[in-house]
Amino acid sequence: MKLFLFFVSVTSLFGGYIAFGREYGVAYFSRSPEFSIYEELAFGAEAIRLPYSARGIRELFEVCGDVRQGVIYALQSQEVQQVIDGKCLAWALAALDRNPTYSAAHTIKMMSSTQPQEIRDSMVLSQKTSAYESWDAKLRLAKSIDLFGTGGGDFDAAVQDDIRFLVQSDRGRAWLANLYQRIPLVRDVLARTIDARPAAEKADFLQKVRAGG
């Protein structure tokens, strides 16, 4: 009996040590300077392992989202971008193995993909599991809105639902106005969707578009 208890204690301590190591590694990584994070993702020899806590996983995915939208990433070669996307995708797939409804994992999977159908599918799954989270909604639209009208009713509905959600807040309207200014291709779906919203939301969105122009 004593031997059994000793074995259980050692196993618990070892498991706790591994878990702490993963959490500490992610916390240190996510709080590093932007260029250090980029270098680790692009050239790091050892991939950071997915942490166990929801908070740690979220921090890791927020890093992926921020890097993927950053200037440093945009200036890199396609090969380097693929390395970064591959590491973020591996974390997303590992998270989905644990929990298939993890919305942020679907979001990162969508961002890491270059296949239109996979982007559409991941976007719909992310939207279904996190319809009222602005972080996910902005990443979803930034990646997939230009596919509107190409992927069927579920995908188009998810795009418009994200637009309707974001246009309800001041920050959301500012973000959508910026998107409208930057990508002429998406102006039609933005205009048509927002035109059906209450007058106050429409007026403020148009004001922000004009201010940005």
Image (tube, rainbow, N blue to C red):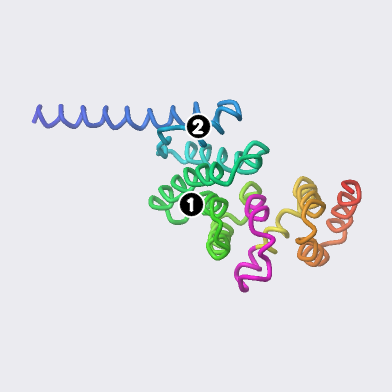
Q: Against 7, is 140 above or below?
A: below
Inspect the image, locate mark 1, and give the three-letter code of the amino acid beneath it.
Tyr
Using the image as rendered, state which of residue 165 and residue 38 is in the foreground.
38
Using the image as rendered, state which of residue 162 and residue 8 is in the foreground.
162
Secondary structure at badge 2 equals: helix
Find residue 40 and name its label.
Answer: 2
Magenta highlight range: 137-158
In the rendered image, residue 160, in percent from the top left (x then y), is placed at 70, 64
In the rendered image, residue 198, in percent from the top left (x then y), is placed at 83, 62
Q: Quadrant of the N terminus?
A: top left
Residue situated furthest bottom in the rendering: 152
Find residue 211 and name its label.
Answer: none
138 is within the stretch colored magenta? yes
Secondary structure at badge 1 equals: loop
Using the image as rendered, state which of residue 159 and residue 69 is in the foreground.
69
192 is within the stretch colored magenta? no
Inspect the image, locate mark 2, and give the three-letter code of the amino acid beneath it.
Glu
Residue pictured at 77% horizontal, 61% vertical = 185
